[in-house]
Amino acid sequence: MKSTLKIPGFVDLQVNGFVGVDFSTEALTEDGFIHAARTLLDRGTAAFLPTLITNHEALLRRNLTIIVRALKKDAVLARHILGFHLEGPFISAEPARSAHTIQRPCSRLHVRPSTSYGSGQTEGCAC
């Protein structure tokens, strides 16, 4: 008996980047994020969490802001983004808590929730 599984798309809880666009580097741009995200959706992903790996506060803030601005520009794309996946030693400064290396892990990074991405900004990072 042949069976077929039909689903509307996949949900990916960790997308660090796609088609040569890395969401965690200084090279990230709004257009780059939109291109990567749209291509991911075109290839069968229904929704996903853009992922940022452990990094310094300034780069985390910069890249989250870029992603939020991109989502403000593209309302269709924004409906497919479930939130953000932030990796790293945010809860403990003890060594060996993460595969990522950083001198001063961020103990708190808060992203204000926004249903429209209209006010989503990073705040309150105590590093």
Image (cartoon, helix red, strand yellow):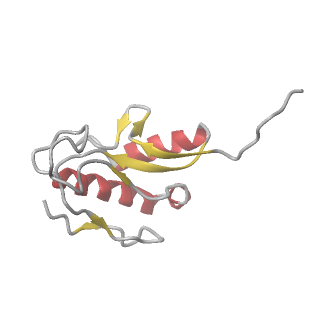
Q: Position of residue 12 (x, y in %)?
A: 52, 45
Q: Position of residue 10 (x, y in %)?
A: 61, 44
Q: Position of residue 91 (x, y in %)?
A: 24, 57
Q: Residue at x 24, y 68 (%)?
A: 123
Q: Nearer the viewer, residue 91 or 25?
A: 91
Please say if 25 is above or below 93: above
Q: Nearer the viewer, residue 116 or 90?
A: 90
Please say if 97 is above or below 79: above
Q: Residue at x 39, y 70 (%)?
A: 113
Horizontally, residue 104 falls left or right of residue 83, namely: left
Q: Nearer the viewer, residue 66 or 96?
A: 96
Q: Residue at x 29, y 44 (%)?
A: 53
Horizontally, residue 33 falls left or right of residue 56, namely: right
Horizontally, residue 55 falls left or right of residue 24, namely: left
The extreme right residue here reads: 1
The extreme top residue here reads: 1
Q: Residue at x 70, y 47 (%)?
A: 8
Horizontally, residue 9 falls left or right of residue 107, namely: right
Quadrant of the image containing the C terminus? bottom left
Q: Position of residue 71 (x, y in %)?
A: 44, 58
Quadrant of the image containing the N terminus? top right
Query: How many marks do you count on the picture?
Result: 0
